[in-house]
Image: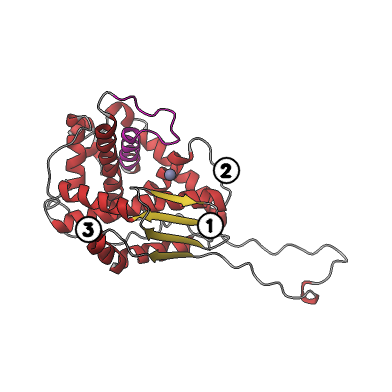
Amino acid sequence: MTAARARIAVVAALALAGGGACSRSEAPAAVPAVAPPCVPTTLTAPASEPAATAAPGATSPDDRPPEAAPKAGRLALRFEPTEHRKLDALTREVGGSDLLAQVTRDIDRAVALPKDVALVFADCGTDNAFYDDENATVTMCWELMGSMRDNMRREYRDPRDARDALYGAALFTLIHELGHAYVDLLDLPITGKEEDAVDQLATFMLVDSGDSGVEMALDGALSFVHDAEAEAQEAGEDAEPATWDEHATSEQRFFNVICWIYGSDPAAHSDLLESHGGALPDERADLCPDEWRRLSRAWTTLLAPFGR
Ligand SMILES: [Zn+2]
């Protein structure tokens, strides 16, 4: 059992109200914890359509002036400096890491966007991440990265484990925000809450990429536990949950993600079940394999026309 799994196992008992530090030392040694996940193999470009037959009398394609092929947009990762001195080391570490650049390149190779999308790490004055449709920019706030770093340091005794967990949670968030860009720029006909749909995309892309991606998705789930803890602290334990919000509650997002991870391979992830000491109630778990099948098919189908 890895630390994220161990942590998720105690979450149920603690009713999302916090817990002690744990070690990631049980992580399988063969799986580098920050190995970049590959792009889902299911998100490959479809075979190109055969050329349409010209109507009788139409100008031969050879007689027409050549049209420039539409230029596909690119993802552009950018790291801006921070004004928060306590985040200086973090910005140097994250900005100098190959992991985010590699994952961005892999995702970029899989999906062609109609315009460039900037992925910017910058100061925002708040712990957040968001997609701005006016300028096609995903912003990951350094303040959010700082909170995630601090939370994961409390979670994991080994600094390397804490760093790996930070990258896992950050990538989950980055892909979630990129999902908003896909929905906007590709005009994807999603149904239901967009926030749930892009949580599905983040889980799908990470889990589908292999074992290290599963660990990252688990760390993404863990960050929802931290969000729930912070929200409870801020609003008071007795505060009403924001049921009107476009997001599901942080607790619901946590259970959704571990449900989908479990559903992707119930035999491999049975330790997530409540009956096996995990956090996922067995009643929900019964539905998870179908939820996973539907969401993976939905995202594969939605993105297939936009493969490079
Ligand atoms: Zn969102």
Residue at the image point whose x is 37% and y is 64% from the top: 80
Can residue 33 be seen in the rendering of this structure?
no
Residue 96 is situated, as x and y percent measured from the top left of the image, at 29, 69
Q: Quadrant of the N terminus?
A: top left
Residue type of the residue flagged with mark 3: Lys
Q: CA distance from mark 2 to mark 1?
A: 21 Å
Q: CA distance from mark 3 to mark 2?
A: 42 Å
Q: Is residue 70 magenta?
A: no
Residue 155 is situated, as x and y percent measured from the top left of the image, at 17, 46
Q: Is residue 47 left or right of residue 98?
A: right
Crowd band around label 1 with a 10 angstrom C-alpha radius: few (<14), some (14–19), many (20+): few
**Which of 147 and 234 lies nearest the eye of the viewer?**
234
Residue 269 is situated, as x and y percent measured from the top left of the image, at 25, 42
Residue at the image point whose x is 38% and y is 29% from the top: 242
Task: Please report whichever mark, 2 or 1, sits nearer to the chain's N-terminal start.
Answer: 1
**Which label was assigned to residue 189?**
2
**Which label was assigned to residue 86?**
3
Crowd band around label 2 with a 10 angstrom C-alpha radius: few (<14), some (14–19), many (20+): few
Q: Quadrant of residue 113?
A: bottom right
- Circle 1 residue: 135
Residue at the image point whose x is 35% and y is 40% from the top: 260
Q: Is residue 245 magenta?
A: yes
Crowd band around label 3 with a 10 angstrom C-alpha radius: few (<14), some (14–19), many (20+): few
Q: Is mark 1 within 8 Å of ligand 1?
A: no
Residue type of the residue flagged with mark 1: Asn
Can residue 270 be seen in the rendering of this structure?
yes
Which residues lie in the magenta part? 239-262
Observer-side mark, 2 or 1, equals: 1
Say which element carries label 1. loop
Say which element carries label 3. helix
Q: CA distance from mark 1 to mark 3?
A: 29 Å
Residue type of the residue flagged with mark 2: Pro
